């Protein structure tokens, strides 16, 4: 797992550690010291810990005018043992919401499992963003993780499913990625990513 880096080709557009409104402002990274672990596996040092023992994040892009954040996740999303949604909400999502962000895309290719608990934090998050015209979307969620999320009835609070699970976002510009996901959430037809060569 130490070889899996967060998506880095948008760093010329946005870097969370350089954004004074980001919860990770002024965070320092090493390319050589591996200190964060997922169980017995070291993670690449560019991932950001936010209080969870099993789930890590990277804010890839924020646009305050569009009120959107694109966030990549890695690890095991475990609400049962570690209350990961609480840590995500309190330490990443709420600081962004205080800065006006209400549209959240979570890239979940590297989320290996989901273990549910109660849905209070999801309901709170969804209510707050929906009241301001926002949304939460999980992109490219693995099939078994999607089934675990469906078992917890999270579709009441977040957009995910087959239509959000084959998006080729890494070769696109971040604002285009946001605009396409936004159109999908709003039900605008004809917006899809093109498969790159």
Image (cartoon, grey):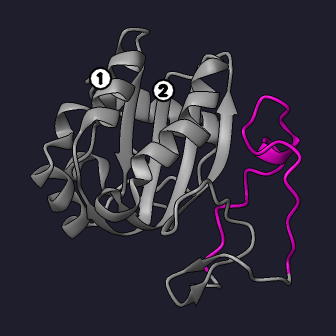
Q: Position of residue 19 (x, y in %)?
A: 83, 36
Where is the N terminus found, in terms of image quarters? Answer: bottom right
Residue drawn at point x = 84 percent, y = 53 percent:
27
Residue drawn at point x = 85 percent, y = 32 percent:
20
State the extent of the magenta-drawn residues as a range: 4-31
In the visual, does 183 lie left or right of 12? left
- Comparing 75 with 117, the one in front is 117
- Comparing 132 with 197, the one in front is 132
Residue positioned most to the bottom? 40
Residue 29 magenta-drawn?
yes
Indicate which disc residue 54 carries. none
Q: Is residue 190 visible?
A: no
Q: Determine which residue is flagged by label 1.
A: 188
User: Which quadrant of the figure has residue 51?
Assistant: bottom right
Please tell me whether residue 127 is drawn above or below residue 83 in the rendered image: above
In the visual, does 50 lie left or right of 130? right
Q: Determine which residue is flagged by label 2.
A: 103
In the visual, does 117 lie left or right of 32? left
SS at mark 1? Answer: loop
């Amino acid at each position: 797992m130490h070889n899996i880096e967060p998506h880095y080709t948008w760093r010329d557009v946005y870097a969370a550690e350089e954004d004074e409104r980001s919860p990770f402002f002024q965070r320092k990274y090493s390319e050589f010291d591996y200190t964060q672990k997922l169980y017995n596996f070291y993670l690449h040092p560019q991932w950001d810990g936010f209080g969870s023992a099993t789930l890590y994040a990277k804010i890839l892009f924020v646009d305050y005018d569009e009120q959107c954040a694109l966030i990549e996740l890695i690890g095991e999303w475990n609400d049962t043992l570690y209350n990961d949604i609480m840590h995500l909400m309190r330490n990443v999502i709420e600081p962004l919401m205080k800065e006006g962000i209400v549209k959240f895309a979570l890239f979940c290719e590297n989320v290996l499992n989901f273990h549910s608990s109660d849905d209070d934090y999801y309901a709170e998050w969804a209510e707050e963003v929906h009241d301001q015209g926002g949304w939460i979307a999980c992109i490219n969620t693995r099939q078994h993780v999607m089934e675990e999320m469906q078992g917890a009835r999270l579709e009441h609070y977040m957009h995910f499913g087959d239509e959000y699970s084959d998006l080729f976002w890494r070769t696109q510009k971040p604002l285009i990625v946001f605009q396409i996901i936004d159109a999908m959430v709003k039900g605008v037809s004809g917006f899809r990513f093109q498969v790159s060569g």
